[in-house]
Image (spheres, grey):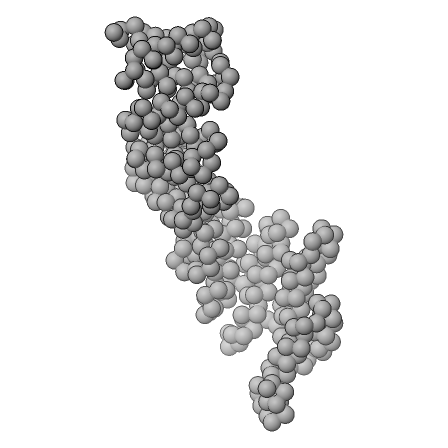
Amino acid sequence: ALGEFQRQFPDSENAPQAAFMQIMNQLDNEPDERAMTTLRAIEPGTANYHRALFEICRLSHRMWSEASEEETRQARAIETLSAAEESLAEDFPDDADSGAAARYVRICLLAAYVCLQQDAVTDADGWLRRCENWMAGMATRDIGSDFHFLQMNIAARQSDDDRESMASQWLLRNTSNITHLRAALVSQARLLDRQLAQTVQTGGTADPRQLDLVIDAYQRLVDEYSPDDTALSSDNVARTALFRLAELQMQSGRYEQARNSYSRLHRAMPDQLAFVSGLAMAEMREGNLRTAARHWRTIASGFSPGSETWLDAKYHLILCLADHQVDNAKAVLQQVQVLVPDLPPAWQQPFEELRSRMADMP
């Protein structure tokens, strides 16, 4: 059809574009190296030269991304950046040429991505800033998403929280790219969490509204992944987000929600100490002391007497049993005294207080 168009309308302003599309269709099934040779044969000054430079840049980028050996990958990276510079030097857009502007932005994004993957963060930022002024006129949402995704990652590597936050917020409002959306959710949760930590570290008290913002960010991240037990066991991002959400729920006094979060984690990975101990603590805060006691017993059984985890589990087990099984609580306390007669300094006072408490119980 493209060839027929060229024959019937050789003088049409669209004829060069049709000719180039025909070339690209023919190259679809060609090896990359042969396609590169064909594109480089298009001479400067011809109607399709700028489009050829753009395709050379894209092909170089693809060959880089598919290279497996490090030496080849490094060479392809250099080729991609060289092709990008060559293309931008020849195809600089003016205000009236939206096609050239789109090509210009795309090339900058490809080059920025290559630099970022090569840990050349400053160079990546330089490429991104070269096309920043052209972004306002970009009608396609995918270009905007790619731009802000790169901007967010570069800012994160540069510890520029404000710039990272602006980029991630843009993605949360506008992107339809699931990878970009999830990355933006991770970014926002991490930034808000960092602000919360800084407030506490400087001696301040976290505003409940600030804590709510962090919890909401992690909840949205967990909801986006919607992990089942199988997914939680294999997806580190979903698991980490749910674990942090559970910690924050405990911190804010939302013990029932924390218990549900820890329960999901424990079902997915029953051997993880942090998950079962978190669940045991949440059960205690909820007043489910019999259930909590079972978890503390399970934890203690997996560690040697006198170890930090064993002592912690026995201490909390005694607290649970003291509520409804006083004799059993005293027996566990006696066991600790026999097995660990010389308690570590950090545990001497807590267990001494338990002994005093037990002595007053019938």
Up-down: is 26 above or below 6? above
Q: Position of residue 153 (x, y in %)?
A: 52, 50
Q: Residue at x 33, y 29 (%)?
A: 283
Judge whether 215 appears above or below 48 on screen: above
Judging depth in this view, the residue of 173 and 329 nearest the camera is: 329
Side (left or right) of 37 relative to 216: right
Q: Specify the farthest residue to the bottom.
A: 8
- In this rendered view, identify the residue nearer to me: 226 or 241: 226
Question: In the drawing, does residue 23 fall left or right of residue 203?
Answer: right
Compare residues 233 and 274 and report the one nearer the observer. 233
Res. 283 visible in picture:
yes
Query: The C terminus lies in which quarter of the figure?
Result: top left
The residue sitting at 72% across, 75% down in the picture is: 38
Q: Can you tell which quarter of the image residue 92 is in?
A: bottom right
Tell me which residue sits at (49%, 14%) in the image.
305
Find the residue positioned furthest to the left. Answer: 362
Q: Looking at the image, which is closer to me, 48 or 317?
A: 317
Query: Residue 59, position in %: x, y?
Result: 66, 66
Question: Which image quarter is the N terminus in?
Answer: bottom right
Where in the figure is residue 238, as x and y percent of width and height? 45, 44
x%, y% of residue 100? 56, 73
Say if 288 sits above or below 84 in the image: above
Q: Is residue 285 visible?
A: no
